[in-house]
Image (cartoon, grey):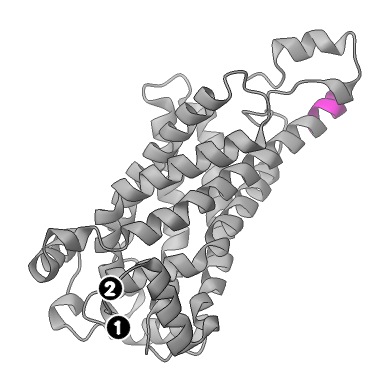
Amino acid sequence: MPTLTHSAEVALATSSVADMEYDYEELPETSPLTMHLIAGAAAGIMEHSVMYPFDIVKTRMQVVGSPSSVVYSGVTQALRVISTTEGVRSLWRGVMSVILGAGPAHAVYFATYEQTKKVFTAAAGGNANSLAAATIVSDALMNPFDVIKQRMQLAGTGYRNIVDCASKVLRHEGMRAFYVSYPTTLMMNMPFQSIQFGCYDMFRRSLNPTGVYSPVTHVLAGGMAGAVAAALTTPIDCCKTLLQTRGASADLEVRAASSMATAARIIYKQQGLTGFTRGMKPRVIANFPATAISWTTYEYFKWVISRRDAKKHY
């Protein structure tokens, strides 16, 4: 795995390190695991926290059989109604769960992806295997935090904070409540990540054929990739939301849901096919800047780390 491009190697003979071109696409093999963790954690926290109000709107639009099941006419109207009836602070209810969970989960995700690429490079479906491994490990860590986040996002649940929410869910519904949606989450995130990574690589190469570090390229490529992936996986996200918020539902059928198939049947029965597209607009709106921030942050850290390691080496 090269750490410097051929042009950079040639440039070394005639210019200073400061003027070198770096292949930051891959973190150097000499980079310790902690560097992957730092880059991934920073990307994850930025991605999930900045656009959090739109995530609340998405959850409110998707939830079934809850006091939060209000039909909003649009994203702007939903934000206005929530902020005026519940207060502006309500748009950030549960964000600490995301901050606490997204950092470690994304750190593990990017670290697992980078490390397993070395193992799967020569194997069939190399990058796909790496993405799958990273998603399985990351989601196992993040799923409980995501359940707490969505419970906090609902209206009238009465949770004082994320600790109170976690303890009440555990006491009344057991540990299973934190993982009942895990298989569905994997079924959503595996295609989401595959679509996102594939689109990101395609958009990045189209916008920046030379491969030099370009923040604008990462913003546009990351944003478009996230938007496409978010739109295509919304139906599965609707099922995941039902499973993760089932304990707050007054609908006995929803409370008994235990799988993606069951959730899909309930959504179709109560809302028809349109039920699988609910929350798509705020999901896309949130994911465009969120994934743009995530990729830009991660690529920046990779670039900085690559420059630092190259300077040490030479």
Q: Residues within 10 Å of mark 1 (few under 14, many from 20)?
A: many
Q: Are marks 1 and 2 in contact (CB under 8 Å)?
A: yes
Q: Tell which of 138 and 265 is nearer to you.
A: 265
Vertical placement of residue 119 versus 279, above or below: above
Q: Earlier in the sequence, mark 1 or mark 2?
A: 2
Name the residue: 19% across, 63% down. Answer: 275
Tell me the element at label 2.
loop
Q: Which residue is mark 1?
A: 248
The stretch drawn in magenta includes residue 310: yes
Name the residue: 34% across, 66% down. Answer: 179
Of badges 1 and 2, the one in the foreground is: 2
Residue span colored magenta: 309-314
Name the residue: 39% across, 67% down. Answer: 75
Vertical placement of residue 69 versus 85, above or below: above
Name the amino acid type tagged 2: Val
Name the residue: 62% across, 43% down. Answer: 296
Q: Which residue is mark 2?
A: 63
Q: Is residue 244 visible?
A: no
Residue 111 percent coordinates (x, y): 57, 43
Q: Is residue 140 visible?
A: yes
Residue 138 percent coordinates (x, y): 47, 52
Tell me the element at label 1.
helix
Classify residue 110 by image quadrant: top right
Vertical placement of residue 18 versus 63, above or below: above
Residue 167 percent coordinates (x, y): 45, 85
